[in-house]
Amino acid sequence: MKRIIFFGALASILVLTVLFISGICIAQDNSVARKAAEAKATVALGAREWNVDFRSTDPASKVKPWSDTLILADGKLNSKYLAEKGYPVSNIKVTVEDGLIIWETMQGTQKGDIAFWRGELRGDSMSGLLSLKPPVGETNEFSFVSSAVAVPKTEEVKEAAPQKQTEPQKQTEPQKKKTEKKGKK
């Protein structure tokens, strides 16, 4: 009888161990799949110019609707309108939930103004929320929707991703050296 209980307990422990290890493997597979989906989503967002229209979420607000152009390239957000007000280019965090691409970021000015962004992309349509928090005063909330999508000019993409500007310089230096060697012969 003691042997039966012992082997029953041992079999239960083995089954639980196998289930636990299987759960870890499945979680790792899901993590890899999630990261791959997020990388694809970043590419889907990237190197596009989004014309978006903003409206206050407060019906009593006196702020008039306004438009902006957003450039999402190389995992960064560049808002043309907010750039003029001192907001820098910022990194975005991208997640994917049920086919919906979600991006989020925060920007801050040297004056202490903060902008919180959350955008959602489904197909070629983007919508989201922008919260503008001044150093003193109340936060202003805006909803936005895309009105058009276009591929930006190369210079605009470079503005949104300044690290790309250094690569061509590295390539041109060796070419100069090659021409110098040809001139010496």
Image (spheres, grey):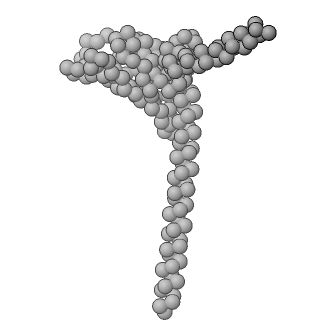
Decide: is 11 above or below 93. Answer: below
Which of 13/60 is in front?
13
Name the outermost residue toward the top.
Answer: 183
Q: Position of residue 108 (x, y in %)?
A: 33, 21
Location of residue 129 (image quadrant): top left
User: Quick one: quadrant of the C terminus?
Assistant: top right
Name the outermost residue toward the right.
Answer: 185
Which of 16/179 is in front?
179
The answer to whether 24 appears left or right of 184 in the picture is: left
The answer to whether 32 appears left or right of 114 in the picture is: right
The answer to whether 172 appears left or right of 115 in the picture is: right
Decide: is 135 above or below 10. Answer: above
Going 27% across and 20% down the picture, which residue do you hit? 112
- For the question of whether residue 56 can be seen, the reply is no
Going 55% across and 18% down the picture, which residue do you hit? 166
Going 59% across and 15% down the picture, which residue do you hit? 169
Going 40% across and 20% down the picture, which residue do you hit? 144
Q: Position of residue 7 (x, y in %)?
A: 52, 83
- For the question of whether residue 25 can be seen, the reply is yes
Q: Position of residue 30 (x, y in %)?
A: 54, 48
**Total label count?**
0
Q: Position of residue 175 (x, y in %)?
A: 69, 14
Name the outermost residue toward the bottom.
Answer: 1
The answer to whether 111 appears left or right of 171 in the picture is: left
Name the outermost residue toward the left.
Answer: 136
